[in-house]
Structures are given as structure tokens and as C-alpha cells.
């Protein structure tokens, strides 16, 4: 948010804060969410790079299209384990996975 907009909101009594502060997340919880979203984003990018539809990826993973959609959206019901195994199934190497995680989000 730009500073001018923030100042206008604060002048009207609004409190401007971060999602972490608003939700009272610990640094560990914030890091977990950031990693999950990073892996979800990379899953979608890899699928698109391979010219796969969500259904085609679901077939590869013996899953459903709706599950792939939830994986790409970072839904709370999707585990980090599932995201990592799916990336590996699409050919991501452990080194590439480490590089993904090394990128500052």
C-alpha cells in the first residue's frame, strides 16, 4: 500500500498492519505458509511449462483435477508432502527443489 493511502486510512482511525500481525502468526507459521505457497506456485508453473492440464497432471498423480486445483491454490487440506512428491513426479530434482526454496518470497 502506498504511504499516502496508508496515512489517509490511519487519519480516519483505521489500523494498518501486516497479515502476520493481524492473524497473530508466529515467524514459524509465517514461514510455513510462505513455503507452501511457493511450492504451490512452482507446481502450477511446472505443470504449465510441461503443457499439462490439471486433469492430465491428476491422471499422472492418480488423483483428481479438483485435488490438483487445491494443490495449486495452496489449500489448507494439501500437505507439504503432497506438493513435494508431486513436484518430484513431474521431474523436479532435489537440487531444483532446494533452489525453489532458496528464492526469497
Image (cartoon, grey):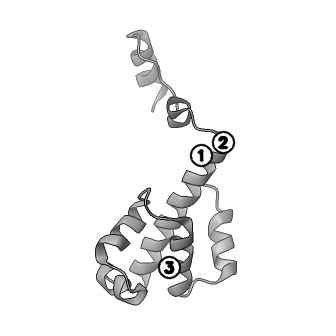
State the image coordinates of residue 16 (x, y, percent, origin top left): 47, 23
Mark 1 is surrounded, within 10 Å at the Cα level, by few (under 14), some (14 to 19) or many (20 or more) other residues, namely some
Residue 65 quadrant: bottom left
Residue 57 versus residue 17 in the image, above or below: below
Which residue is at 41% across, 58% downward? 75
State the image coordinates of residue 71 (x, y, percent, origin top left): 42, 67
Name the image quarter holding the N terminus. top left
Residue 92 versus residue 33 in the image, above or below: below
How many numbered circles does the render carry? 3
Q: Are marks 2 and 1 in contact (CB under 8 Å)?
A: yes
Residue 32 versus residue 15 in the image, above or below: below
**C-alpha separation, residue under disc 2 versus residue under disc 1:** 5 Å
Of residues 5 and 25, the one nearer the viewer is 25
State the SS at label 2. helix
Upstream in sequence: badge 3 or badge 2: 2
Q: Which residue bears the numbered disc 1? A: 30
State the image coordinates of residue 40 (x, y, percent, origin top left): 47, 65
Determine which of the numbered discs, if any, sits on residue 70 in the image: none
State the image coordinates of residue 102 (x, y, percent, origin top left): 68, 64
Q: Are marks 3 and 2 in contact (CB under 8 Å)?
A: no
State the SS at label 1. helix
Which residue is at 56% across, 74% downward? 84
**C-alpha separation, residue under disc 3 versus residue under disc 2:** 26 Å
Q: Which residue bears the numbered disc 2? A: 27
Which residue is at 29% across, 71% downward? 66
**C-alpha separation, residue under disc 1 versus residue under disc 3:** 23 Å
Q: Which residue bears the numbered disc 3? A: 86
Mark 2 is surrounded, within 10 Å at the Cα level, by few (under 14), some (14 to 19) or many (20 or more) other residues, namely few
Upstream in sequence: badge 1 or badge 3: 1
Which residue is at 45% across, 64% downward? 78
Amino acid at each position: 500500500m502506498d504511504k499516502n493511502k496508508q496515512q489517509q486510512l490511519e487519519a480516519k482511525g483505521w489500523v494498518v498492519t501486516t497479515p502476520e500481525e493481524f492473524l497473530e502468526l508466529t515467524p514459524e507459521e509465517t514461514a510455513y505458509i510462505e513455503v507452501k505457497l511457493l511450492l504451490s506456485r512452482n507446481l502450477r508453473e511446472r505443470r504449465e511449462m510441461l503443457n499439462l492440464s490439471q486433469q492430465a497432471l491428476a491422471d499422472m498423480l492418480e488423483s483428481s483435477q479438483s485435488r490438483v486445483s487445491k494443490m495449486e491454490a495452496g489449500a489448507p487440506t494439501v500437505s507439504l508432502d503432497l506438493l513435494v512428491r508431486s513436484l518430484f513426479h513431474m521431474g523436479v530434482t532435489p537440487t531444483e527443489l532446494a533452489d525453489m526454496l532458496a528464492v526469497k518470497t
